Image (cartoon, rainbow, N blue to C red):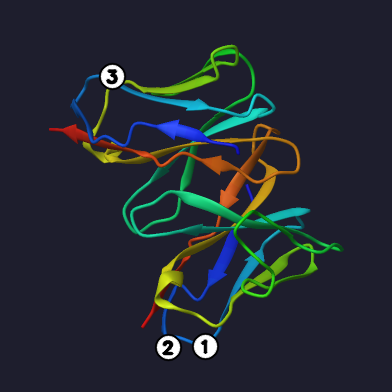
Amino acid sequence: QKEVEQNSGPLSVPEGAIASLNCTYSDRGSQSFFWYRQYSGKSPELIMFIYSNGDKEDGRFTAQLNKASQYVSLLIRDSQPSDSATYLCAAGGGADGLTFGKGTHLIIQP
Amino acid sequence: SAVISQKPSRDICQRGTSLTIQCQVDSQVTMMFWYRQQPGQSLTLIATANQGSEATYESGFVIDKFPISRPNLTFSTLTVSNMSPEDSSIYLCSVKDRGRSGAYGYTFGSGTRLTVV
C-alpha cells in the first residue's frame, strides 16, 4: 500500500516568515514528487516538482527531497496571505497516477 | 502544460441514477487519470485510462461502478453508476504531460462537484 503522510495542520505562519511543509512517503519505488496548492472549492494547482535528492528552488518556493529518509518538504519564503491554502504532497512514477497525502492547511496571518 | 476542459462543473443527482463526466484535452496525451476527492479529504486515484487499452482500476474501485471510456488521445469520460449519497465527491481528471521545462508533470481539470440526494 503506497502512502504519503502529511500533518493536516492548520499551520499558522506570520506574513513575511518562512512556511515549512513536510511529508513522508512509503514507496521507495516512487520517482517523482509534487507539491500542489488547492484553494477551497478549486482543483489542485502544481507548485513544484522534484525528482533528485537535494534542493530545487523556484521563486519563493524551495522543494527538498531526501530519498534515503523518504522525506519531501516545501519551503515558502516571504509568505503572503494569498499563500493560505491546503498544500498537497504527492508521489508517483512511471505510468502510475499519483498518491496524495491528506494535505496541510496553511494559514498566513497578516 | 495541457489545458483540460472538464464538465459538468457540478451536478445534483438522484440516487440510483448515473452521471457521465467528460474531459477534453487541448493536446494529445497518452496517460489520463481519474481521481475522487471526498469532502475534507485528499485525492484518491480511481483509475488510469490510456488510449487503446482497458482502464486500470485501483483497489476499491470497479469497472461496473465507474466505467471509463478513452476513445482517443484527447478525450475521456468517467461514469458514476447507480449513485448513492456516498458518491458525493469532487471528481477530477488529470493528464501526464510535459511542462515548459520539458519535465513531466500532472495537470488537473477543474473538477466536477457531485451531490447525490
Which amino acid type corresponds to the residue marked 3 in the rendered image?
Ile
Question: What is the distance, in whole Å, between disc 3 and disc 2 at their CAs?
Answer: 47 Å
Question: Disc 1 designates what residue?
Answer: B17
Chain letter of the residue beneath label 2 in the structure image? B
Residue at 60% from the left image edge and 39% from the top image edge: A1
Label 1, secondary structure: give it: loop
Question: Disc 3 designates what residue?
Answer: A18
In depth, the one of A71 and B51 nearer the eye is: A71
Circle 2 crowding by C-alpha within 10 Å: few under 14, some 14–19, many from 20: some
In depth, the one of B55 and A15 nearer the eye is: B55
Figure check: B19 above or below B54:
below
Give the number of the mark in front: 3 or 2: 2
Chain letter of the residue beneath label 1 in the structure image? B
In percent of width and height, residue A103 lies at 39, 40
Chain letter of the residue beneath label 3 in the structure image? A
Residue at 41% from the left image edge and 59% from the top image edge: B38
Circle 3 crowding by C-alpha within 10 Å: few under 14, some 14–19, many from 20: some
Which amino acid type corresponds to the residue marked 1 in the rendered image?
Thr
Q: In which quarter of the image is residue B63?
A: bottom right
In percent of width and height, residue A49 lies at 56, 30
Label 3, secondary structure: give it: loop
Question: What is the distance, in whole Å, between disc 1 and disc 2 at their CAs?
Answer: 6 Å
Question: Disc 2 designates what residue?
Answer: B14
